[in-house]
């Protein structure tokens, strides 16, 4: 009788099935356009199509504020045979009503969205893999640099996608390397001239310029110079730059 009672209760209150993953929901949508939205990290905003700005909080004006729309991040994926063919990213605004082949997944977890976009980036059949990489870096409270590092080092991935991964690795490393430095170091000389010298080093042959930039990024006392060196290392496509980014971020 006791077992029968439990059977009746289970029939009345069925155990809920596990929620579908975001990746499964995208697969289930089939061919057509899939839309998803997720929370943007601090400082990400937009003033219209093709405009994405990342504000670092420095130089804040207590009297005036921009009309830059603060989010969410919106991604449109054109799926073909289970793989994304094209991708568009936006910040803020709203979706226009879609056609019959549009599936809107609504507001999703930023963590799940970033993981999905970075997993899909190598599969994009057009030149939009870099768009998915960028979108993933805009997700709120999500650390993506380990996945970016894997993408950047994977020679099977399209070159434009790898370049975008390297670019955002450089940005992440620059932020980490200057974290906590809230005063200007006491290096002598004009900072703008010094930054121009860092740029000039980036234009030299790699065997000459890259080691010098790495030394600046590791040891210079001025945070702006270190961040500038990391930026130009991110443009160099040199494997030594990736090693440095990994070292800083770890």
Image (cartoon, grey):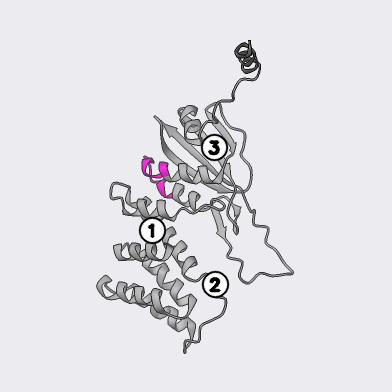
Mark 2 vs mark 3, CA separation in Å: 38 Å
* Residue found farthest to the left: 207
Q: For the residue carrying disc 2, how many other residues have a C-alpha within 10 Å: few (<14), some (14-19), or many (20+)?
A: few
Label annotation for residue 215: none
Residue 172 belongs to the span the image colors magenta: no
Residue occupying the point 62% across, 18% down:
10
Quadrant where the C terminus is found in the figure: bottom left
Query: Do residues under tags 3 and 1 come within 8 Å of each other at their CB atoms?
Result: no
Q: Is residue 189 left or right of residue 215?
A: right
Q: What residue is rendered at 62% in x and 16% in y?
A: 6
Image coords of residue 145 (percent x, y)? 43, 56
Residue 118 picture location, percent across and down = 43, 46
Q: Quadrant of the N terminus?
A: top right
Give the residue at mark 3: 35
**Mark closer to the chain start, 2 or 3:** 3
Residue 180: image tag: 2
Rendered view: 43 above or below 81: below
Identify the magenta region.
Answer: 119-130
In the image, 55 versus 173, the foreground residue is 173
- Dot in front, 1 or 2: 2
Estimate how packed mark 3 is, as few (under 14), some (14 to 19) or many (20 or more) residues with alpha carbons within 10 Å.
many
Mark number, residue 166: 1
The x, y position of residue 205, in whole percent, is 26, 72
Side (left or right) of 80 relative to 110:
left
Pinpoint residue 89: horizontal percent, then vertical percent: 52, 46
Mark-to-mark CA distance, 1 and 2: 24 Å
Which is more N-terminal, label 2 or label 1?
Answer: 1
Distance from label 3 to label 1 (Cα)? 26 Å
């Amino acid at each position: 009788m006791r077992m029968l009672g439990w059977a009746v209760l289970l029939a009345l209150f069925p155990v809920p099935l596990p929620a579908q993953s975001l990746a499964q929901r995208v697969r289930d949508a089939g061919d057509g356009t899939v839309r998803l939205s997720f929370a943007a990290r601090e400082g990400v905003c937009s003033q219209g199509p093709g405009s994405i700005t990342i504000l670092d909080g420095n130089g804040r004006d207590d009297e005036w504020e921009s009309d830059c729309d603060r989010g969410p991040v919106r991604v449109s994926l054109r799926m073909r045979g289970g793989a994304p063919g094209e991708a568009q990213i936006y910040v803020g605004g709203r979706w226009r009503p879609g056609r019959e082949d549009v599936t809107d997944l609504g507001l999703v977890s930023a963590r799940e969205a970033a993981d999905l976009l970075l997993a899909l980036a190598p599969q994009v059949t057009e030149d939009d893999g870099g768009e998915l990489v960028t979108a993933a870096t805009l997700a709120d409270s999500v650390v993506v640099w380990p996945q970016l590092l894997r993408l950047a080092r994977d020679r099977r991935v399209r070159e434009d996608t790898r370049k975008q991964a390297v670019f955002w690795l450089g940005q992440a490393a620059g932020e980490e390397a200057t974290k906590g430095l809230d005063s200007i170091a006491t290096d002598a000389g004009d900072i703008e001239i010094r930054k121009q010298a860092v740029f000039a080093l980036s234009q030299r042959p790699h065997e000459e310029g890259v080691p010098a930039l790495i030394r600046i990024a590791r040891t210079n006392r001025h945070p702006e110079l270190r961040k500038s060196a990391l930026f130009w290392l991110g443009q160099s496509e040199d494997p030594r730059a990736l090693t440095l980014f990994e070292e800083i971020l770890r």
